[in-house]
Image (cartoon, grey):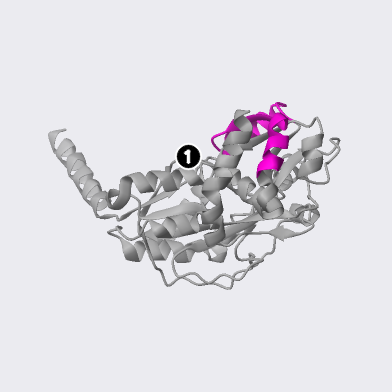
Amino acid sequence: MKNYLYHVAGLCLVATGAMADTPVLNVYTYDGFDSDWGPGPQIEAAFEETCACDLQWVAAGDGAAVLSRLRLEGDNTDADVVLGLDTNLVAAARETGLFAATNVSAEYDLPVAWEDDTFVPFDWGYFAFVANKDVEAPADFKALADSDLKIIIEDPRSSTPGLGLLMWVKAAYGDEAADVWADLADNIVTVTPGWSEAYGLFLDGESDAVLSYTTSPAYHVIAEEDDSKTSWSFAEGNYMQVEVAAKLASTDTPELADQFLAFLVTDAAQSIIPTTNWMFPAVTPEAGLPEGFGDLTQPADALLLSPEDAAAAAAPGIEEWRDALAQ
């Protein structure tokens, strides 16, 4: 028995030594990406088959909250890669000086030209209010404000959809944005920190509509065989979101971080995105998009501020939003 115990102990030491030699890649992301139903688990398994490494997700709230955490941690962060910022946060993220350039490139299928040596796009979509089909859709924000419809939105200080809504109103109405928010205030049931909470409340019947994406109804069709949900196209146009990932300058595994960013735009990873993150992939998978993506709402127009214009609009937009909801 003693010899057996020595043998077992020896095997444990060998295993522990092997684990200690396995490089670890820490990726900060938003809660939904690292959920059981999100793309995180599948992308982790697929990447680990190629990297001889241990990919560890660190969920840190919604996208804007992830950037706030990185600002606090600075160069002492444990993150090697961050995944889940978007074009509205790119300029602010770049200003931190925390991110490093990469040589990753791909033949992107984005509706906008993409040239950036640091931030790698991995999916995109259009913001939209999602509702049941039996709810009469307003034509635009002003019609929504004039209606009795109740909506749930996300906090722009912690959530990329919430910040995207600010940019949407600003891009559509410019100097009139504050008036639009004032008119919308009594339509807003509640403001949640992130997308997951907002969508959950909507599904529980707490509102007529929720700020989400034109691609969200595809989830109900494909995963639940439920075609009762739709999204609203507004006459002003719908605002676009491009989600990105980037390498931290402080990482001690820069080659592994680059390997992960390159993997993120391969067919192996991009084919996971549509039916887990329920967004359009940055590179169309070789097998094409799932069938349920063919009947999605097409926006009347696509709106998107440049990263610089979005950064300039963020602070005054948040002030307008906060003043309107405080009335």
The spot of residue 239 in percent (x, y) is 67, 54
In which quadrant will I find the N terminus?
A: top left
Q: Is residue 206 found inside the magenta-colored segment of the image?
A: yes
Between residue 238 and residue 226, name the one nearer to us: 238
**The disc labelled 1 sits on which kind of residue?**
Gly
Q: Is residue 267 above or below residue 211?
A: below
Residue at screen point 58% across, 73% down: 107
Q: Would you name the residue on which mark 1 appears?
A: 61
In which quadrant will I find the C terminus?
A: top right
Residue at screen point 54% across, 49% down: 314
Residue at screen point 24% across, 50% down: 20
Residue at screen point 50% across, 72% down: 105
The spot of residue 106 in percent (x, y) is 54, 72
**Segment tinted magenta in the rendering:** 178-207
> Please, what is the dominant secondary structure of the magenta stretch?
helix
324 left or right of 64 in image: right
Camera sees residue 290? yes
The spot of residue 246 in percent (x, y) is 43, 60
- Badge 1: residue crowd in 10 Å (few <14, some 14–19, many ≥20): many
Q: Is residue 51 above or below residue 35?
A: below
198 left or right of 30 in image: right
Q: Is residue 272 above or below residue 181?
A: below
Helix, strand or loop under label 1: loop
The spot of residue 117 in percent (x, y) is 45, 70
